[in-house]
Image: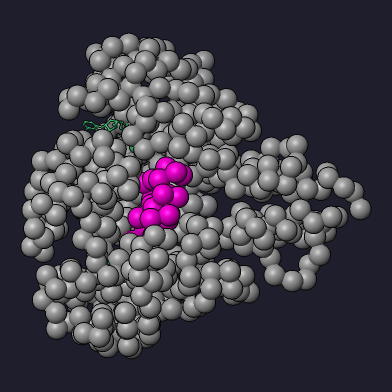
Amino acid sequence: MTAVRFENVRFRHPGGVEALRGVSLTVAAGERVAIIGQNGAGKTTLVRHLNGILQPSSGRVLVGERPTAGRSISELAASVGYLFQNPDEQLFASSVRIDVEFGPRNLGCTPAEATARADEALAAVGLSAQAQSHPLHLSLSERKRVALAGVLAMRTAVVVLDEPTTGQDARGADLVAAVVETLAASGRTVIAITHDMDFAAEHFDRLIVMAAGEVTADGRPADVFGEAQVLERAAVEPPQLFRLAQRLGWPQRPTGVQQFVDAFAARAPR
Amino acid sequence: MIVLREVSYTYPEAADPALHGIELNLQPGSITGVVGASGAGKTTLAKVIAGFLPRVDGGELTGTVCVAGRNLAELSLVEAVGQVGLVIQNPFNQISGAKYTVREEIAFGMENLGTPRAEMAARVKQVAALLRISDLLDRSPYALSGGQMQLVAIASMLVLRTPVLVMDEPTSQLDPFGTRLVFAVLDQLQQAGTTVVIFEHKLELLQAHADRLLVLAGHTIVADGSPTEVLADERVDGWAIGSTRYTRAARLARGRGLLPVHGALPVSFEQAAATFGGAR
Ligand SMILES: Nc1ncnc2c1ncn2[C@@H]1O[C@H](COP(=O)(O)OP(=O)(O)OP(=O)(O)O)[C@@H](O)[C@H]1O
Ligand SMILES: Nc1ncnc2c1ncn2[C@@H]1O[C@H](COP(=O)(O)OP(=O)(O)O)[C@@H](O)[C@H]1O
Ligand SMILES: [Mg+2]
Ligand SMILES: [Mg+2]
């Protein structure tokens, strides 16, 4: 089943910049996809089409096999959850709990159900103790996780995360990674934009590379990170241990710690 | 260049200090990295060094902060800004809101410091070229991607050519090349004698570029040394600063009996190349 599809999508910002120059791609339900690529490549512009914040200048965007054109933002919000790059664009309420419960209530959940969902989402992002806080009294990295909790509480089939690990410390990054794993295990479609190549390689099955408004590569992390010219044009580099294996001249292409050590173990048995 | 003596700081209405017992002496021509878990006090320390606390946000500071031999508290705001540039944590908030183009936005701080017009234009051009954002100069500062905004925020501070530059997570929105570019620029500033303090989570880049690494935990400095030394410290897990992928791989390999268990774990690419490249 198709979760989302872009058909030759072009988009020009009101300012005049053509941010998307003909993007076509399909994401199947249950896939976990990371979008990587240079600053200004059009990643955020692309995913903002999925919840109807933006409509293409030409081409079509489909969510759940139906075009987004003519569908309201609130209708799309029931299918696609979107974590904004800047959490301050997303948060509005005077307490963390009110903010996180807002989405489920809007979907028609009972107050008790909204509360239960908020509790679960706040636990997942490690902020249960901050439920009564004012979002503005939290740090930027915490605000990002409050916004993430708000997205999780919607329990949408498709979850789109715009740079979810940005500014997170080690624990925050682990929590975000666990959220991605949990979502994927429950069959949801996860699409994340990231500049963290290790995170992309370790938690996603498919990488989409963008440069200058176009998709320039699309495939498994181990394959995409082998394409030096594509990476160079997109201002990205392979993950740390992938580069180390390259430097050591190993034939394997490890994308994470486990694979790297497996490759090491396979080299010369004692 | 910067000396902090017995510095403690408490936010207005806060019960406990956000920083306490800070002793620090930073030399010109050095890059100091600061790491610490969320809430450890990084942003607070950045603002204290830049003279924003208590001047801008209130609260109570005890102890002294001296820049170039003068007590920061006794400088006017303009004098303080002329000494220490601060790139704040959220680039979305650093844009002044007063300007229509990126070119004017980058020049904004110089206007306040009274830099001559002709020189302003030349400096904006130079710094934009350095950060590879020349093509954005005539755009609106609001019509930018997150990473582009962060580069503009960095440019706005670099252009002031302050003797001290403090950066609070300046690469959080940048692509990998942009991140490397910022660190390369810091290397150049260091060569030119600038005192750089960078608060950052990316351990492998700090390892490669910083002369000195400080760890903040529990609102005070708990470690201070060369990055390689500090990252290999046996207390590192307790600081909640994470570890490089090189260290994690070596730990796992030791756990599986693939590497000898004695000696320091690798913290950098070069060390890991030696650890895993040696004949087995
Ligand atoms: N509100 C806007 N108005 C006009 N142009 C914009 C606007 N937002 C972004 N742009 C431009 O559109 C292009 C794509 O921006 P977008 O935010 O999609 O990039 P991105 O790939 O998400 O980058 P980053 O990694 O820096 O977040 C860039 O050239 C950017 O300057
Ligand atoms: N404006 C503020 N008012 C009160 N407390 C604050 C404020 N900003 C930060 N704090 C508190 O000060 C401590 C240090 O925060 P901060 O310097 O932002 O940490 P970091 O940058 O390391 O994440 C935390 O306990 C935080 O909750
Ligand atoms: Mg973006
Ligand atoms: Mg901070």
Residue B26 image position (x, y, % from top left): 37, 78
Locate residue B109: give its quadrant. bottom left
- In percent of the image, x 26 and y 46: which residue is there? B128
Relative to B133, does residue A159 appear above or below in the rendering? above
Colouring mode (rainbow / by chain / secondary structure / one colour)? one colour
Residue B174 image position (x, y, % from top left): 39, 45
Instruction: Tell which residue pokes out farthest to the right in this image.
Output: A270
Q: In this view of the protein, which residue sits in the foreground, B17 or A215?
A: A215
- In percent of the image, x 63 and y 29: which residue is there? A223
Is residue B122 visible in the rendered image? The answer is yes
Left or right: where does residue B229 sit relative to residue B78? Answer: right
Magenta span contains residue B184:
yes
Quarter holding the C terminus of chain B is bottom right
Residue A9 image position (x, y, % from top left): 34, 15
Quarter holding the N terminus of chain B is bottom left
Q: Which residues are magenta?
A: B168-185
- In percent of the image, x 18 and y 69: which residue is there? B82
